[in-house]
Image: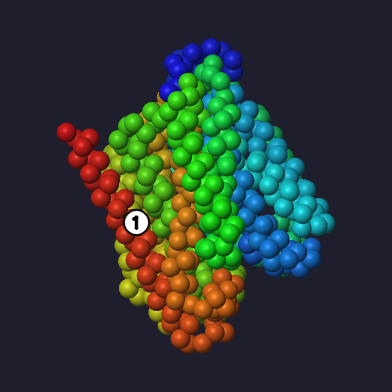
Amino acid sequence: MSAGVRTGARLGAPAWHPDEDDDARARYGWRVLSVTALGVMLCFINASTLNVALPQVARDLGASPAQASWFLLSYMLVLTVLILVFGRLSDLFGQRRLYLAGLAVLTLASVGCGLATTPQMLVVFRCLQAVGAAAVITNTTALLTEAFPTRLLGIGLGLNATISAAAQGLGPVLGGVIVSTAGWRSIFLLNLPLGLLALHWARRTLRPGVPAPVERFDGLGALLSMLGLGSMVYALSMGGPQGWRSRDVIAGALVSVLALLAFWWSQHRRRHPLVDPDLFADRERGTAYVCVLLICMAQTSSLLLMSLFLQGVQGLDAFQAGLGVAPVPLGMMVAAPVAGRLLGRHSALRLSAAGLVLTAAGLALLAVLLSGGIARWQLGGGLLLIGLGSGLFLTSNNSGIMASVQPQRRGIANAVRSTLQHTGLVVGAAMAMSIAIAPLSPLSQQAAYAGHLSRSSPADIAAFIGGCRTALWVLWLLCMAGIALSLHTRQLVRR
């Protein structure tokens, strides 16, 4: 277990002072929000724009299908394994320092991506991009929590979530426009002026954070967490293309289980663990962590399924399919700031449960109505409910977790939440796709992954639709489990 925290002055003055009035702190909070807005836009747009440009990038660099898949997988893998590490480092060395370093690395790596001449070069610079993005994403929420007064924290986090959702939704659209007008390299090179602007504004705006605890960094825990999470992401990502019984997938899954078990064991025996086990001792916070995993499995998987449905069954191209699933980020953009305002009158646990209810309703609607001839407004209505529920949940969940921990633990508390969020994305996508394509032949499964199922037989298309409906019901069950857990926790807390 972690030792007591000594509040020295290693990092200078805290982000706000006890004698600073509430209005002055609020003004500083809005400035910090403008800083984090630039950061999350860079991170999330970078994460999604390449999806649209992937065919052209692979063609220009002469990449094989396996190499092209690593253009996307490398970013996701490195981002997932480093969030916990950077969360702890930010608690030890300061959120401002890590955030600025992340912006600098992300900007320089983007230039490297834009100038890459071989597939190997692009993979290396995508990994470096993910290093920078992990440092930025890990510290965004902690910076906002430290900057805003309590009465405005929910609104600030809600607006930050709105910007994140907008960036994720706009990424494929912007990618399509930029690729068609200026070429794929411009996707990365445009990050240079934007990154320099974000870095300059962050350096001018952010104050030194709260003093760091004098504790050692848990190197063993960091290595075990990276090995466990990295192996898990690799195994789940390779399961679809290679098959779940392939040697690489089985080996990756085995290494992941062993490493994560060793990590869990070590964290209960280290004096200064990477992840303080006390973070999970509080019932409400523990429930919040479990539920963020469940809803992210449901939200991201439904996006993937419906995107492939629009391409593989209804014959849309990738750009049109991106517009077809836009109700999810739009719903998040609407609900996130509303959730921020409601937090002043309702508990984070209650609002999170309401978000799960809306998400479950959207999944059930899609599962009931999904067919080859489903109307766009019906599909959009189900996706909009999922987006509204996700926006309501994530803002409330985020605020509840951050408000429940001491300032010197906010970095790792947010890192645990972000890691579970990304883990839910990977696990949910792998699980949902496995269920959806299970009735198909190996050849038709490849066509489903590529979005070309419309060229297959009517029987294969019908089987894929049935598989998607089954997957949606499984995701609905995950949300219902989250609702039941939230209600049970609320009853325990009331006693």
Q: Quadrant of residue 315?
A: bottom right
Measured from the top left, where is residue 265 in percent x and y? 44, 33
Residue position for label 1: 478
Q: Residue at x 57, y 78 (%)?
A: 443
Q: Residue at x 38, y 72 (%)?
A: 469
Horizontal side of 399 relative to 230 (left or right) equals left
224 or 57: which is nearer to us? Answer: 224
Q: Is residue 252 visible?
A: yes
Measured from the top left, where is residue 196 in percent x and y? 72, 40
Q: Is residue 197 visible?
A: no
Crowd band around label 1 with a 10 angstrom C-alpha radius: few (<14), some (14–19), many (20+): many
Q: SS of the residue at dot 1? A: helix
Colour scheme employed for the rendering of this structure: rainbow
* Vertical side of 161 occupied by 14: above or below: above
Horizontal side of 310 relative to 341 (left or right) equals right
465 or 363: which is nearer to us? Answer: 465
Measured from the top left, where is residue 43 in percent x and y? 61, 47
**Looking at the rendering, in which quadrant would you find the N terminus?**
top left
Measured from the top left, where is residue 191 in percent x and y? 71, 48
- In the image as oriented, which residue stretches furthest toward the left? 495
- In the image as oriented, which residue stretches furthest toward the bottom? 458
Q: Residue at x 45, y 22 (%)?
A: 2
Q: Residue at x 27, y 47 (%)?
A: 485
* Vertical side of 201 occupied by 428: above or below: below
124 or 441: which is nearer to us? Answer: 441
